Image (spheres, rainbow, N blue to C red):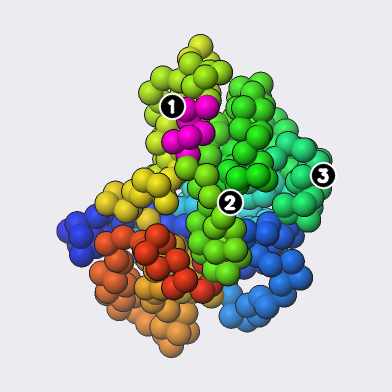
Amino acid sequence: MDNQLIDAYGRSIEYLRLSVTDQCDLRCFYCMPKGFKDYQEPEHWLSFDEIERVMRIFGELGTKRIRLTGGEPLVRKQLPQLASRLAALPGIEDLSLSTNATRLSKHAVTLKQAGISRINVSLDTLKPERFTEITSGKLDKVLAGLMAAKAAGLYPIKINMVVMKGINDDEVEDIVAFCIEHGFTLRFIETMPVGDTGRNAADLFVDLKEIKQRLEQRFELVPGMMPGGGPARYSRVAGSDINIGFITPMSQHFCDTCNRVRLSVDGTLYMCLGQEHKFELRPLLRAGISDEELKTAIRHAINLKPERHEFNEKPEQVIRFMSMTGG
């Protein structure tokens, strides 16, 4: 068991979501307030050397999957260089990226060459004006990034849509048709009360069981499956290779199979999106901790992982923004 991370509830932690920045070039209203500028100063960010060291230790402890997140990870300078270093680490079998795709047209080829195997792209609407209302950004940049990723051979490309009542829930069929046209996987996500922004969007919640029932009236859905370490439950559109995932942290939580932790850009390990359990690695790294001591610290941190989130019972207890935790 020395090369495995097992939490107090017997779950094997083999998936780490690594935030490389808390900055973002969009302002999705359910994630980050408009005008928000209270970022971590760069000197508090983990350096590439520090990130590589921590990821190497996680790899030695059995972590197999790393997902680069933010904020928007492509805001971090020289990100493909970091990706190349992480892809070469022993034990790391899967290196992926979550992005809003606004900068993807410029970086898609180099990310593929660096070892990024697949990407997730946030896309809540196909309507330009609505996209601007939700994100304060421009849809055409995202679509250009998606097409560049497709041309570069990144696969699979997964579209993440947060379904919100009265905002974009009228577009779910259109998003499915868009993904069928372009060969993208689609994942619908329920809104979560993370930080004040997430709680303010609580009245926009849509139970994804209702969305699936709606889709079944237009598309024939059969059981599906996708590789990866995430929590989505998949169906496939019959007669196609397109899978549709449903991520349901609120209506049907998946805490008993949770296999992931998050490392923020400032070196804080977060054990759960819906709890405040955390462990700070940066002070230890900069105090000269040895590799064996670092392994001991990580094992201790994993034992802090709670049994489940409490989004429904205590939605007010998570005060940090999603962008500060890592997507």
Displayed quadrant of residue 129: top right
Kind of residue indicated by mark 3: Glu
Q: Nearer the viewer, mark 1 or mark 2?
A: 2
Give the residue pinned by disc 3: 129
Displayed quadrant of residue 184: top right
Kind of residue indicated by mark 1: Ser
Whether residue 110 appears in this view of the structure is no
Residue occupying image coordinates x 52% and y 27%: 214
From the viewer's perspective, is 18 left or right of 40?
A: left
Indicate whether residue 155 is drawn in magenta. Answer: no
User: Closer to the N terminus: mark 2 or mark 3?
Assistant: 3
Place of residue 78 in the rendered image (x, y in percent of width and height, measured from the top left): 68, 60
Place of residue 41 in the rendered image (x, y in percent of width and height, measured from the top left): 66, 80
Does dot 2 land on a helix, a strand or a loop?
helix
Mark 2 → mark 3, Cα distance in angstroms: 19 Å
Image vertical order of residue 279 relative to residue 225, above or below: below
Label placed on residue 235: 1
Residue occupying image coordinates x 47% and y 57%: 17
Segment colored magenta: 208-214
